[in-house]
């Protein structure tokens, strides 16, 4: 079967990167952007694989626009950072096969070798096998899971992580010390933290949506806020021994990662 791929949002970012991956494998690729490329109806008629690669906030609207036009036997796929609502929307909007996909990296990577990709199959098997084989052939580590399991993991990897980064950035702002003043004192570890803060602050709407939009994030963030308060109380009490014991607990909990 001849495969032609359409990417909604394929003119920049991850959409453009994914178009390059498919082209390297010899597949014809059609892309559309905000003001260019095929309209949804034409792309659905032309392409038997359609990938939604728009910003997270626009994903559901794009699914609703193109899903009804895709025939049974074709594939509708997204690459959004969240999966439960997105996969459910694809299942509702189309009779085509459905796979949720989340590449766990940005568009600057040059190779898929040892990169993590999550696939959330929802309808059909043929296209899941095709995607899995394609990504593994390129060297990626492919994990197949459910949308709920994906979002639960992303609540830790993304939502909690980015919330912590934002909190650090706001604390630095509250300290009233400029980075210019700090430059003579900065360590490599602190430089890495600053880079993460800059990344989050450079795209506020995306990271706000990743944190707020994940239904599993609130509990983790509530626990985080509670823990920060407890640590603050220990510091206020000048109790170094108690703080050291907390650090030891943290070390034990991270044993699998060290």
Image (cartoon, rainbow, N blue to C red):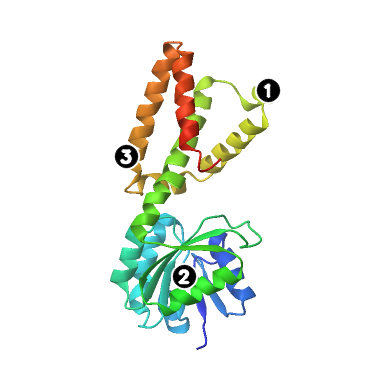
Q: Residue furthest left?
A: 92
Q: Which residue is mark 3?
A: 219
Q: Which residue is mark 2?
A: 51
Classify 10 Å Cα crowding around label 2: few (below 14), some (14-19), many (20 and above): many
Judged from the image, the secondary structure of the residue bearing numbered disc 2 is strand
- Nearer the observer: mark 2 or 1; the answer is 1
Q: In the image, residue 215 lies at what x, y percent?
A: 32, 48
Q: In the image, residue 238 lies at what x, y percent?
A: 46, 10
Q: Which mark is residue 96?
A: none
Horizontal relation, residue 16 to residue 188: left or right: left
Horizontal relation, residue 102 to residue 134: left or right: left
> Residue at position x 55%, y 55% from top?
105
Mark nearer the N terminus (1 vs 3): 1
Can residue 166 be spotted in the picture? no
Cα–Cα span, label 1 and label 3? 36 Å
Q: Nearer the viewer, residue 245 or 70?
A: 245
Where 73 sits versus 59, above or below?
A: below
Cα–Cα span, label 2 and label 1? 46 Å
Can residue 187 be spotted in the picture? yes
The quadrant where residue 160 appears: top left
Cα–Cα span, label 3 and label 2? 32 Å
């Amino acid at each position: 079967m001849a495969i032609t791929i359409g990417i909604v949002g394929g003119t920049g970012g991850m959409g453009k990167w994914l178009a390059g991956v498919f082209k390297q494998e010899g597949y014809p690729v059609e892309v559309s952007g905000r003001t260019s490329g095929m309209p949804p109806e034409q792309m659905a008629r032309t392409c038997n694989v359609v990938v939604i690669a728009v910003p997270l906030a626009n994903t559901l609207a794009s699914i609703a626009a193109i899903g009804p036009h895709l025939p049974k036997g074709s594939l509708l796929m997204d690459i959004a950072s969240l999966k439960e609502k997105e996969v459910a929307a694809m299942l509702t909007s189309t009779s085509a096969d459905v796979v949720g996909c989340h590449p766990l990296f940005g568009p600057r990577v040059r190779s898929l070798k040892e990169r993590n990709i999550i696939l959330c199959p929802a309808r059909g098997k043929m296209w899941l096998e095709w995607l899995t084989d394609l990504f593994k052939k390129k060297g990626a580590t492919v994990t197949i899971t459910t949308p709920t399991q994906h979002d639960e993991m992303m609540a830790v990897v993304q939502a909690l992580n980015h919330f912590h980064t934002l909190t650090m950035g706001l604390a630095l702002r509250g300290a009233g010390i400029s980075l210019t003043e700090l430059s003579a004192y900065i360590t490599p570890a602190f430089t890495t933290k600053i880079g993460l803060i800059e990344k989050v602050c450079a795209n506020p709407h995306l990271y706000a949506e990743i944190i707020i939009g994940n239904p599993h994030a609130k509990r983790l963030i509530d626990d985080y806020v509670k823990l920060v308060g407890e640590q603050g109380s220990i510091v206020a009490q000048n109790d170094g021994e108690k703080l050291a014991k907390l650090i030891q607990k943290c070390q034990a909990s991270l044993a699998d990662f060290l």
